[in-house]
Every structure is written in structure tokens, then in C-alpha cells.
Amino acid sequence: MEYKIVEKITRGGSSRIFYRCRRGKESYILVWDKDVYNYLKLQRHLSERGIAVPRVHWADEHSHLLVMEDLGNDSLYELVRKTRSISPLYHAALDALVKLQVDGYTHAPVKRYYDYEHVRWEQQYFKKYFLRQYCKIPQKKLRAIDADLEALAERLIAQAKPWTNFLMHRDYQSQNIYIKDGKVKIIDFQSARIGPLTYDVAALLRDAYVTISEKREHAFVTYYLACLKKKGIKLKEAEFLPLYHLTGLQRNMQALGAFANLSLNKDKVYFKEYIPRGLALLCSGLVKSPFKELSGICTDPKIMSRAV
């Protein structure tokens, strides 16, 4: 019995192509992925360790195609918009994250690391697409933040050193987390790296796609630390929060760079709607930081007005 294409799915910033298709009474997702080999290798690894990723029903590496489980439309992003009771959803997402970070790390087929070079690449990505192209800040003026960006990168890597041996999803946000049959399913994990555990939790709790109050964010951090403790990883808030805040800044910069690049250069203009929230998150973190030049540029009323 052949698969029948029902619709093309336009989602996210991925270069992969998705179609919803049917075979008999069942619904599936057909994916074209130029890097299907590495995706399948990581999918098998995660699945074998009981980590909640979509099932792959069929794959042809030569044609770069695979047919995978249809998770439906209930992403965390969509569900949060429909309910006031978001804590159970975020608790489930944090439970799944800890399992991915800890259980997924052992023998992970991942050779890329979230290191100083990659941190600096993310910062340049933010400068190039968000500050320079989107906000039109002159290159000469941007030189004022170079020292702050370098200091942020050095501090982040130094503080992360004891906590870098974890599997890092690298885009663990509400649009990449689904709930199916009451259970979390994680997608878009193909960019995984080995890195600090704070990056993914910051991506989830300082997510430009949704609005979480500072009080709720703190409660979810407390829950996350309790999840880590159950895995034998004991971290006090006082040692966790400084690194969490640094990686939160870094993540918010990366996201803004992506929103600008996708909306201006990839014909995905809908990403513009998330820029105001993303900038607000970055500015709120910078106000409490020692990075005054970076804070000054990002909180400049002219910049903020362009980002609305």
C-alpha cells in the first residue's frame, strides 16, 4: 500500500521538507532531509535509551527520505496557548529534558561540542543578522560591544566546565516539544552537541514563543534541579543560577539572530512576531549583568522601536 500525500507542512526554521501523508487509515510524516544519515543515527541512539523521539517507520538514505510517526498538532507551544494550567506541561517537558541530557549522553553519536568557538559563532550570528541587518546598527558602533561579547563567552565556558558532559538538544523550545497520548515527544534534535546542561533549560524557560512570568520561571528551575537530583546530580541554586543566566543571554542572542535571518533572508516573515519578546528577554537579563555596552545597545529606545 502506497503513502498518499495530504498536505505540505510549513514549520520552523529547518531546511528539511515535511509532508503529512496517509497509508490506509494511518497518518505519517514524510521528510526530505539532506543529512538523513546523521538524523537516523541519533534517532536510533535516543530511541534505544527510552528517550521520547518520533518513531521512524521507513527510511531511504540514498533518496534522503524517511517516513516517521505523526505527532499531531499538540506542541507545547499550542497547548500553552489553550490552558492556564501550564505547570504539568512544563514539568513533563523538564522530566524529558533531564532524561535526554543524562541518559542520552552515554555513547551518543555526537562529535560536536558547545565550546568557545561555537559560542563566539553564535554571537557573530546575532551581530550580523539581528543588530547589523535587522536593526541597522553601523558596524563602527557595534565594535563597542566586542569586549563584552568576548567576556561573556569566556565566563560562560569557564563556569560551564564542571557541567559540560551532557547531551544538549540545542533548540529545546516549545515548538519542538509535543504531547501525544499524554507523553512528551521531542523533535528537531539533529543539531545536538555535547555541552552544558543549562543551555536547553534556558531555551525552554526563556523562550520567545511563549510568555512565562519570572515567578514561574524560578519555580520551574527549582523543579528542574529536583529532577537532576533524582539522577544523582546535585546542584544548588546558588551555583546553578549564574551559569543559567549566562547561557540564557547567549541563547536569547542566538534566537534573535535566527529570527532576523529567517524573516529577512529565508522568506519566513512570521518569525518577526517573536522578535519583541526575544529582545525583551535579552534586555531583562542584560540589565542584571556586568555587560554594560551590550546592554546599552540592546536597550537603546531606537533599537527597541525597530524590533517592535
Image (cartoon, helix red, strand yellow):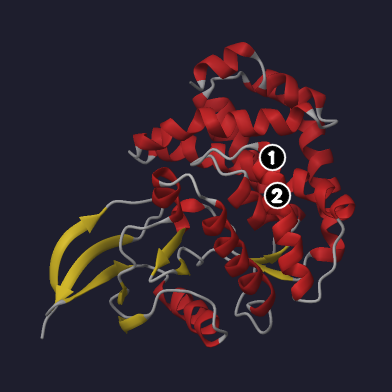
Q: CA distance from mark 1 to mark 2?
A: 6 Å
Quarter of the view holding residue 272: top left
What x and y, as percent, mark residue 82?
A: 39, 46
Label 2, residues with CA under 10 Å away: few <14, some 14-19, many ≥20: few
Q: Which residue is mark 1?
A: 215
Identified at 76% across, 54% down, the residue is 116
182 with respect to 233 (left or right) = left
Identified at 81% across, 71% down, the residue is 233
Q: Nearer the viewer, residue 103 or 65?
A: 103
Q: Which mark is residue 219?
A: 2
What x and y, as percent, mark residue 138?
A: 61, 18
| Residue 197 seen in the current view | no
Question: In which quadrant of the rendered image does the N terminus lie?
Answer: bottom left
What x and y, as percent, mark residue 158?
A: 87, 54
Q: Which mark is residue 236?
A: none
Identify the amino acid type marked 1: Lys
Q: Secondary structure at mark 2?
A: helix
Quarter of the view holding residue 26: bottom left
| Residue 39 seen in the current view | yes
Q: Nearer the viewer, residue 10 or 266?
A: 10
How many marks do you count on the picture? Answer: 2
| Callouts 1 and 2 close, C-beta under 8 Å | yes
119 with respect to 184 (left or right) = right
Q: Report the residue that reaches farthest toward the front.
A: 85
Identify the amino acid type marked 2: Ala
What x and y, as percent, mark residue 183?
A: 46, 70
Q: Nearer the viewer, residue 176 or 190?
A: 176
Identified at 52% across, 57% down, the residue is 89
Q: Secondary structure at mark 1?
A: helix
